[in-house]
Image (cartoon, grey):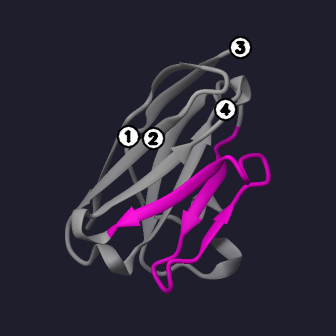
Amino acid sequence: QVQLVESGGGFVQAGDFLRLSCTASGRAFRQYTMAWFRQAPGKDREFVAVIRASGGHTYYADSVKGRFTISRDVAKSTVYLHMNSVKPEDTAVYFCAADSSMIYSTLADYQAYDYWGQGTQVTVSA
């Protein structure tokens, strides 16, 4: 069992920087693939970024590639989402997700993740 708690959301202006954090409780953090998803009002939950348990490989949605970076601190059991040059279309509730048995083909599929945080709101003004 893993509990995830996100923090770091807020209200920022376009072009600003924001860092989201997701701290996991429970055992064996290093064995979990960690991902960020987001959901805007009236839209489906969409994949943002993922960092794999094995090798730490990262993957990004095209909409955030080059602007966002996912990283993790195993000692702190925390995964981060560094959001540079934010845009109004980045406005959403951001969720952290974890799973210990992810395969490549399902990394961007929110239904494949077993554990979720409560979400943190990010609002970007123009």
Q: Amino acid at mark 1?
A: Gln
Q: Is residue 27 magenta?
A: no
Q: Give the residue number, with chain letter if any, for mark 1.
A: 118
Nearer-N-terminus badge (3/4): 4
The C terminus lies in quadrant: top right
The label on residue 19 is 2
Q: Give the residue number, with chain letter if any, for mark 4.
A: 90
Measured in 3D between alpha carbons, the distance from the residue under mark 1 to the one under mark 3, in whole angstroms, is 26 Å
Category of crowding for the residue at label 4, using alpha-carbon neighbours closer than 10 angstroms: few (below 14), some (14–19), many (at least 20): many
84 or 113, nearer to the observer: 84
Secondary structure beneath label 3: loop
Furthest residue to the bottom?
A: 54
| Mark closer to the observer (1, 3) | 3
Name the spot of residue 57 as percent of width and height, x first: 58, 77
Q: Amino acid at mark 2?
A: Arg
Q: Is residue 109 left or right of residue 122?
A: right
Give the image quarter of residue 13. Answer: top right
Secondary structure beneath label 4: helix
Nearer-N-terminus badge (1/4): 4
Give the image quarter of residue 120. Answer: top left
Name the spot of residue 40 as percent of width and height, x first: 65, 30
Measured in 3D between alpha carbons, the distance from the residue under mark 1 to the one under mark 4, in whole angstroms, is 18 Å
Q: Give the residue number, with chain letter if any, for mark 3.
A: 126
Q: Residue at image x 36%, y 50%?
A: 22
Name the spot of residue 121 as percent of width and height, x first: 48, 28
- Do tag 1 and tag 3 residues touch (Cβ < 8 Å)? no
Name the spot of residue 85 as percent of width and height, x first: 66, 34
Relative to 76, say whether 11 is above or below.
Answer: above
| Mark closer to the observer (2, 4) | 2
